[in-house]
Every structure is written in structure tokens, then in C-alpha cells.
Image: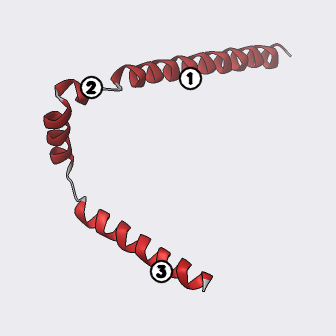
Amino acid sequence: MQTNKKKQTATADQEKVRTCVELKKETIASTLQRVYREEGPLALYRGLGPELTRGALSSALMLMIKEKIQMYITLLMMIVNSA
């Protein structure tokens, strides 16, 4: 009896998901239009600040790592050439 309820629930959940997926066939343009219409033009830029900060920090970290690796390789080349 318990497994029968689980099967019915699973089937109902699958139907619900299938229905939602079929209803939500939005394009990027229609999504942008909906956000603009429902939340206003500033909603299109929400999250831009944190995303730019994340990108800047990521770039700074990669540049620092590149410089450290370059320094160690240069030092290693100097040691190898002097020996």
C-alpha cells in the first residue's frame, strides 16, 4: 500500500513537471520583455555590481598568480644558467 502511494505521488509529480516545462517555453527576448514590464528597467541591471566585482577580483587573482609563476620560472632559469 505504501509503495502504491509513492508511485502515485511520483507519477503526479512527473505530470506536474511535464506541464510546467511545456508551459514555460520562453525565449530570451520574451523573458527580457516580461522582466522589463513586471519589474521595471532597473531590474535588467540587478546583480550587475556583484558580477563586475566578482570578475575584477577573479582577474586580479589570476594576474597575481601569473606574476608569481613568472617570477619563480625566471628565478629557476637564472639558477639553471648559472650552474
Q: CA distance from mark 1 to mark 2?
A: 26 Å
Amino acid residing under circle 3: Gln
Closest to the observer: 63 or 69?
63
Residue 46, percent from left and from top = 31, 26
**Residue 55 relative to residue 77: left or right:** left
Mark 3 residue element: helix
Closest to the observer: 13 or 33?
13
Nearer the observer: mark 3 or 2; the answer is: 3
Q: Which disc, if any, is residue 70?
A: none
Residue 24, percent from left and from top = 25, 58
First in sequence, mark 1 or 3: give its number. Answer: 3
Q: Which disc, if any, is residue 8?
A: 3
Closest to the observer: 17 or 58?
17
Amino acid residing under circle 2: Tyr
Closest to the observer: 77 or 35?
35
First in sequence, mark 1 or 2: give its number. Answer: 2
Q: Which disc, if any, is residue 62?
A: 1
Residue 9, percent from left and from top = 48, 75
Q: Is the C-beta separation of discs 1 and 2 under 8 Å?
A: no
Q: CA distance from mark 3 to mark 2?
A: 43 Å
